[in-house]
Image (cartoon, rainbow, N blue to C red):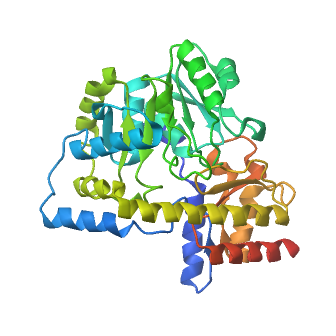
């Protein structure tokens, strides 16, 4: 007999697509992968070297549950450098990925039966994490006119007596959109006026194209911000993230971390210190520019094929495309494109309920040659 919550925890549909793509590759087929949100670049060598040194020096024991002091201080310095914010390192907790940070926050803020507001489309794990705490994810449909983001009007319309918090992501997955500063501030005040908490996912904040947005931490000391070394620094497999929380909640979060996972991976923490050095930063910046070049190629190329992308993404490495001119079922479409054209993309159903049959997500996490090949193959498929 399993817990009832398991009935509501669904796997990613894209994982079945990925498994099928691997089967086709094992059969000798060439597959262009634009389905997985993982940078194709390996971790920058200076970060790898730092991890190796830590291993050789025997740094294999637990760190404090809140993370290495040196790393928390490095993160705080980075907020000062990029955002002009003086964040007390004590407010920063290092976690096993951003997922670990989100689990801590939901354990802190959410009671059984509480509502948590989030955008639809949005990252699917957010809903599942909320359900794990026997709360209810309220997925609010958002349109291109809203930049695919929650706004103050969304909070006013959907906030209920049992709503405890709102979760947003800027830039977002799957749309890559950023919340404009004035809209973010209005949303923050709408949540605050109702006595709720605002959780902001900023794991793609470094991967922005144009002026880098200021962290939501600038809004006030009561905002909860999640970030990660996975995307911008290219450390997906190292499983390292962090959260910044109000001072009053640090002791409780520390106790939760001790019980939930004890500490983030030690080697990953020592390696991450190198991510803030100049040589690693130069590599990371060059990769950000490469992602921007890919976006600037892929968006008009897909539009020319008949996909509708009404909002140019300002960050991350995704294009959320309306495909209703090409198909009446994006789920079937993604399978056909994989089987017949050898291109793997993600169906909209992985990101919520709102207009999922009309949307697919492209991840430009592969090189330019592969992107061009993928576009060529989809074009050929559409002509059949």
113 relative position to 122: left or right: left
Residue at the bottom extreme of this rendering: 28
For image coordinates 72% across by 40% down, the residue present is 354
> Residue at the location (29% across, 35% down)?
89
For residue 162, say whether it is visible: no
Residue 16: image location, x then y, percent: 57, 62
Q: Which quadrant holds the C terminus?
A: bottom right
Residue 145 vs residue 166: left or right? right
Residue 117 sits in quarter: top right
- The correct choice, above or below, for 348 with respect to 184 in the image is below
Q: Position of residue 79 (x, y in %)?
A: 41, 40
Quarter occupied by residue 256 = top left
State the quadrant of the N terminus. top left
Which one is in front, 36 or 131?
Answer: 36
Counting from the top left corner in percent of width and height, residue 78 is at 38, 44
Left or right: where 198 falls relative to 296:
left
How many numbered discs, if any? 0
Q: Is residue 9 above or below residue 331?
A: above
Relative height, residue 215 to residue 273 (above, below) = above
Q: Where in the figure is residue 194, as x and y percent of width and height?
A: 56, 13
The residue located at (53%, 17%) in the rendering is: 192
Asked whether the viewer can see residue 159, the reply is yes
């Amino acid at each position: 007999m399993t817990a009832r919550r398991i009935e509501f925890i669904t796997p990613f549909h894209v994982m079945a697509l990925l498994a099928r793509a691997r089967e086709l590759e094992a059969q000798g087929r060439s597959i262009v992968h634009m389905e997985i949100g993982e940078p194709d670049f390996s971790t920058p060598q200076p970060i790898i070297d730092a991890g190796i040194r830590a291993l050789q020096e025997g740094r294999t024991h637990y760190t404090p549950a809140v993370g290495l002091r040196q790393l928390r201080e490095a993160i705080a310095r980075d907020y000062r450098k990029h955002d002009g914010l003086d964040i007390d390192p004590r407010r920063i907790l290092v976690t096993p990925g951003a997922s670990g940070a989100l689990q801590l926050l939901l354990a802190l803020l959410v009671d059984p039966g509480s509502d948590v507001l989030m955008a639809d489309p949005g990252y699917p794990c957010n809903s599942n994490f909320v359900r794990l705490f026997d709360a209810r994810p309220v997925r609010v449909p958002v349109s291109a006119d809203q930049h695919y983001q929650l706004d103050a009007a969304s909070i006013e319309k959907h906030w209920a007596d049992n709503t405890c918090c709102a979760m947003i992501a800027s830039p977002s997955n799957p749309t890559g959109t950023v919340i404009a500063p004035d809209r973010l501030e209005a949303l923050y005040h709408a949540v605050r006026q109702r006595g709720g908490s605002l959780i902001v996912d900023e794991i793609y904040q470094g991967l922005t194209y144009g002026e880098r947005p200021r962290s939501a931490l600038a809004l006030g000391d009561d905002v909860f911000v999640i970030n990660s070394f996975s995307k911008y620094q290219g450390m997906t497999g190292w499983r390292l993230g962090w959260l910044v929380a109000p001072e009053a909640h640090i002791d409780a979060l520390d106790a939760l971390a001790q019980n939930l996972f004890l500490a983030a991976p030690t080697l990953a923490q020592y390696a991450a210190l190198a991510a803030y050095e100049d040589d690693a930063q130069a590599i990371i910046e060059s990769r950000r520019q490469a992602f921007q070049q890919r976006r600037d190629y892929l968006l008009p190329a897909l539009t020319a094929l008949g996909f509708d992308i009404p909002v140019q993404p300002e960050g991350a490495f995704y294009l959320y495309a309306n495909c209703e001119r090409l198909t009446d079922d994006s789920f079937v479409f993604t399978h056909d494109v994989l089987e017949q054209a050898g291109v793997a993309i993600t169906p909209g159903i992985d990101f919520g309920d709102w207009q999922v049959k009309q949307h697919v997500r492209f991840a430009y996490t592969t090189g330019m040659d592969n992107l061009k090949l993928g576009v060529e193959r989809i074009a050929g498929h559409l002509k059949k």
